[in-house]
Amino acid sequence: MSDSLALRRVTAHVYRYPLETPVQTSFGIMRDRPMVVVEVEDAQGARGYGEVWCNFPAVGAEHRARLVTSVLAPLLTARPFADAAQAFAHMTEATAVLALQSAEPGPFAQAIAGVDIALWDLAARKASQPLWRHLDASASPVVGVYASGLNPTGPEALAAQKRSEGYRAFKLKIGFGLDRDLRNLSAVREAIGPECALMADANQAWDLETAVLHGRELDRHGLAWLEEPLRCDRPWPEWQALSGSIATRLAAGENMQGTQSFAEAVASRAFGVLQPDMAKWGGFSATLPVARSILAAGLRFCPHYLGGGIGLLASAHLLAAAEGDGLLEIDANPNPLRSELCGPLNDIRDGRATLTEAPGLGPVPLTALERYRVPVAA
């Protein structure tokens, strides 16, 4: 199978959806939902689509779009590539010094990841295969899902709504004071029933001492996992100490970058769940091998995702290709940048979604979102 790539155009578009109800985390508030879409076109006019992570800071979407068009596009149109993985390696190596010089390894990694997603989508479309099968011929299109983004104000109402829509697993945002967190966990559990899975995400809110104290209280709630109780840059011995002090499995990974970081996380044995975000680092080229290494170590791979519909679909195809018993994160809050683009992921049945046989990621109806598109200066 050949995925030879000769590109003639690489573009990026920014969209913003204003929120009626801001998304709250322990470290900040999102007042709108941004999305950066990457579109690649080859010499024959075939196209592929990807998405760049751009949630924080609020002004970051336009900057990442410019990195795609001003830095990465010239690298990709200057020469052909054997496949998407070779293009990913070339973009990473060619921008390594620039990313260090500008102190922006994160934005560069995110821009490269979004382009990589688009290149894999293009390759699968040209092969007339759904991307999940293009990545792994033996994969199943059925993926487990969970409802994410349950805010600390009245989360039980949204949880009950999502349960009625077919969800059977839910993740609550915590880190807003122990009493409030515990009340919210009890309210959500009552709303979803004892048979559903419940997780909690602290978004790096605590130091080790606080995490142990809160974690022991959270143990009583039978959580499937406790996500990012510590800052992602804390040393592995702190994660190991926390893991040994509480019963609930630890989860992290959305803020890790690089194959080595994930290898060290696996080796630490501190985690039950690892959650790389393919739109934030790695795309398919780097994240799928990481996912398979996580599963080979006997851990659970559950891709992190919070953004628009293209990146969400890509994460679903990644999860399907990796196999395992992981769950796909789907934001429970209203966002047409997600719902207008994610196709089969709008149809949840008994906690699962089924990807289609459409080539690549499937239809990408960007015209439906034109009113949310914002200009990006050159």
Image: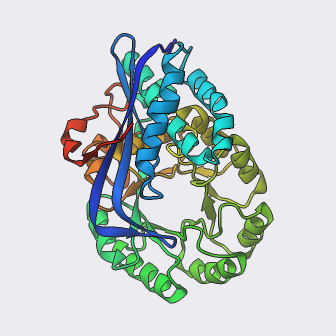
Above or below: residue 81 compared with residue 333: above
User: Closest to the observer: 367 or 268?
Assistant: 367
Classify residue 91 by image quadrant. Answer: top right
Q: Which residue lies furthest to the bottom in this view?
A: 179
Indicate the position of residue 79 as horizontal and vertical percent values. 54, 13
Classify residue 167 by image quadrant. Answer: bottom left
Q: Is residue 52 visible?
A: no
Q: How is the image coloured?
A: rainbow
Indicate the position of residue 260 as horizontal and vertical percent values. 73, 43
Residue in the image at 40% along x and 46% along y: 62
Above or below: residue 319 compared with residue 360: below
Above or below: residue 281 compared with residue 50: below
Q: Is residue 27 visible?
A: yes
Q: Which residue lies furthest to the front in this view?
A: 378
Total numbered labels placed on residues in the image: 0
User: Closest to the observer: 217 or 50?
Assistant: 50
Residue in the image at 68% along x and 49% along y: 298
Indicate the position of residue 318 as horizontal and vertical percent values. 49, 38
Residue in the image at 44% along x and 86% along y: 183
Indicate the position of residue 85 as horizontal and vertical percent values. 58, 25
Q: In which quarter of the image is the C terminus?
A: top left
Residue in the image at 32% along x and 31% along y: 362
User: Closest to the observer: 236 or 62?
Assistant: 62
Q: Is residue 112 left or right of residue 49?
A: right
Q: Residue furthest right?
A: 237
